[in-house]
Amino acid sequence: MPFLEVAHLRKDFGGLVANAGVSFAIEEGEIIGLIGPNGAGKTTLFNCIVGYHSPDAGRVIFKGKEITGFKPFRTNREGIGRTFQIMKATTGMTVLENVMVGAFSGVDDRHTAKAQASEILDFLGLGNVSDYHINELPIAMQRKVGLARALATRPQLIMLDEVASGLNHTETDEVIRLLRKLNTEKQITIFLIEHIMEMVMSVSQRVIVLDGGRKIAEGLPADIVKNEEVIKAYLGEKYARSH
Amino acid sequence: MIIADTLLQGILMGLLFALVALGLTVIFGVMDIVNFAHGEFLMIGMYTVYWTSLLLGVDPLLVLPASAIVGVLLGLASYYWLIKYLLRGPAIAQLLGTFGLMLFLRYLVMFLFGIDYRIIQKGLLVGKSLAIGPFIFDWTKLAAAMLSLIAFAFVYYFLHKTKIGKGLRATAVNREAASYMGIRTDRMNALAWAIGGGTAGVAGGLLVNFYYAFPTVGLLFVMIAFACVALGGFGSIKGAFFAGLLVGVIEMLFPIFGSLIGSSFLGPHFKFTVVYLTYFIIVVFRPQGLFGWKH
Amino acid sequence: MKDAFDFSDFSRAERIGLLIFSLFLIIFPWIGASSFLKAVMIQFLLFSLFGMGWNSIGGYGGQVELGQAQYVGIGAYTVALMMVWWKVPFWLSMPLGVLIAVGYSCIIGYPLFRLRGHYFAIATICTSLVLKDIFENWKLVGAAKGVELPIHEHPDFLYMQFKSDTYYFIVALFYVALFYMNRFRRSKLGYQLRMIKDDEEAAESLGIDLRWCKIKAYATAAAFVAVGGGFMAVYNLYVDPASVMDLDLSIKIALMAMLGGTASLWGPVIGAGFLVPLDRFLGSWLGGHKGFIGLDFMIYSLLIMAVSAYQPRGIWGIVQQFFRGRT
């Protein structure tokens, strides 16, 4: 039984078809990358899975349970966590308090939540910024805080929304390292949307490619870069043929 | 027969409600602020016509422009002395602010004129009625309805056919784009408040011919205006018009409804309760009202 | 539970202030204050109670609510009617009033929290006006005339009618509220509400059911305020829609909390501390002068407009800014 299964997912926005029947499956423990040119429908697909949008047709099945149309707080309770590309400047709550909110999804007591949050912050190397506010930190750290926050909800699947955007090489490598650590040490399945090719190709075990609302390719990174349809989608017909 | 008469009476009141709702919806459309003091603009319009006509010994309908002028000035003053500063802050502060304005105007009037109820006693049309077929209408209400309609049409024309009016609507649709096109959005804000104050003032000036003026009368009418604006869609001018009519009819129909089904509990004393419930139900179940968001 | 009494995360100045204030409250009855001052003090404590309750939804919940009076009314009427009809002691009718208030708040909260901002505020006004209209016309509960509570010759603990010792009763309620809110702000719900205020989308992604959290905050506010209403019933020995369900009451409660500052535990108390005496002293100074009716509200509203234009975080915000500027 696949861990996460998306079947014939369709979503349109008043005439514009963002996802036209997308299907794929992820196994537990995998690291899967989702790529595609701008406007391919990646974000819509992401949002339909986490529950920010409700698909017009098709199904989303997680651990054998139908979660199609579940709102974000429900998908989180089922075990799906997510990060955001842009962290709203939460001037009120500190980093630690933010992560505690994540921890509270599973516990009721403040002290337990605090302990869990501290543990996760240490795991990600953020122990020394617990008392800062998110908007006081550089972007790379903000992203890690977002990750820590989502992790505090003890998800089995984490969905990352362009987690490497705006980061330099060193920071991106750090993210890759952390993701691998999460995958092996905490057995968390990872699904990421990404535009930065080097990042997604080096960390993903498998890659799914969307274009124009449809899945056009799926497979190992090494095969995807040579795939004619993929090249055509990104660079146009000319380059595909000459390749 | 009773129903037809009620319907017509409802439409007459409805035209007045539409005018009141117009000002509220324009302000909201242009800057996303709900003017809690709108009822107080109306109330001041009432007092303006009352006192001017009494002191000058002139027919209340002739001094109507005074309430328009006072309303416009009040709107502009509110904008330049308060609202302008509120716009910089968070929504909660804006709410607090217009609320404070409401209280200030209300209690200022109470302080100046006391709590007595006042109504126009002398005038050309006061106390007279017109019979059209089997229906009898108070001349004051009829005049109020017709003049409200004219005022509404005037503002509509202004917003759709004049350059300034179009600028206002552009600001309502997309503030940033409007400013790029050279429209002075600050002036448009002030204009919106001028229209809001002016229309409410005129409505009040018409109302005082057949409804008592007292310092807290504004609350009732602002709640009616809220219900109309919610029903018609916040920001929609067309919506304000039709919603006004609808609310006028509901308000008139409800007491009859109670007696028709033989209930003594449901009666005229609940006619405004129905308006409040209408707002609640619309806003929860169909937030875009009849005509959707802005225009 | 220990959290309620733990004020360690407040600054030293705040804690000392709280201590001094508490001492003042305790010795107040013995400093020979006039009965007028005593009444003002009781009003202040009552409105602090109302304000702190309101803050659950207005401050922590982030949604300005302008219909709190309906819950004051529910609390007050429950106590009054239970006593008049069936001689039910205060200590049974009060919790019942709270229960009804909480239940009612959950029922109307469910549709209400589909709304936000102005729409929400107006809707809360609507619901409270509807309830008031119903009570004003319902003969069973006394309609506009209200309900008078019978005076017991031997005031006792059962009926809570000892006028002179009412002071300590309201002080006790005040502290219960204070400790409860202290615990509330650091509870799971408190954290969740803060997250919702900051970033709703993120909150949802962390498993928070937005609507349910807001309803819980709203029910908390309703409970507090119903307790206050019950107090009003035994203190005034009289309840009617105009005194316990009026829109003006809702407005006062919200304004005191907002003026004092909704972002803190002390805000509502400060707001009440400012406005209640202002209201009372202005009222008595201007006395029965007919020509001065309304001046008190005029002054409040000027204050409110000034605060909202320049320091939306209220008086406490001004105080904090002042101290921050010094360090």
Image: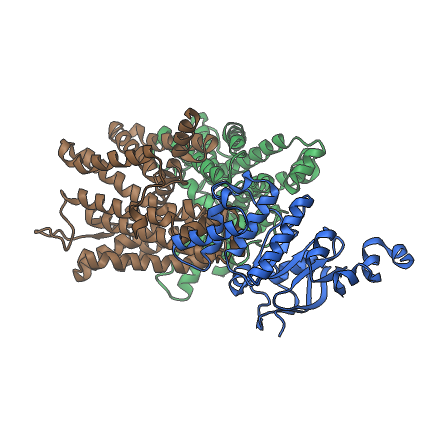
Figure chain in green: B
- Say above or below: B96 vs B256: above
Q: Residue furthest bottom?
A: A1
Q: Image quadrant of residue C82?
A: bottom left
Q: In this view, does C277 lie above or below B267?
A: above
Residue at 51% from the left image edge and 41% from the top image edge: A133
- Quick one: A171 or B109, which is closer to the camera? A171
Identify the hue of chain C.
Answer: brown
**Rendered location of residue B152, percent (x, y):** 59, 42
Is residue B265 rendered to the left or right of residue B1? left
User: Farthest residue toward the right?
Assistant: A242
Asked whether residue B83 is in view, the answer is yes
Comparing B1 with C149, the one in front is: C149
Residue C24 in which image quadrant: top left
Question: Which x, y percent locates residue A102?
Answer: 49, 54
Left or right, A131 with reference to C181? right
Q: How many labels, in total? A: 0
The foreground one among B262 and C284 is C284
**Measured along the vertical axis of the image, is residue B51 above or below residue A43?**
above
| Chain that is blue in the image | A
Percent from the top left, x then y, of residue B22? 56, 43
Residue B257 position (above or below residue B55): below
The reply to whether residue B254 is visible in this rendering is no
C192 vs A22, left or right, is left
Q: Where is residue C239 drawn, in percent x and y?
A: 24, 50
- Colour scheme of the picture: by chain
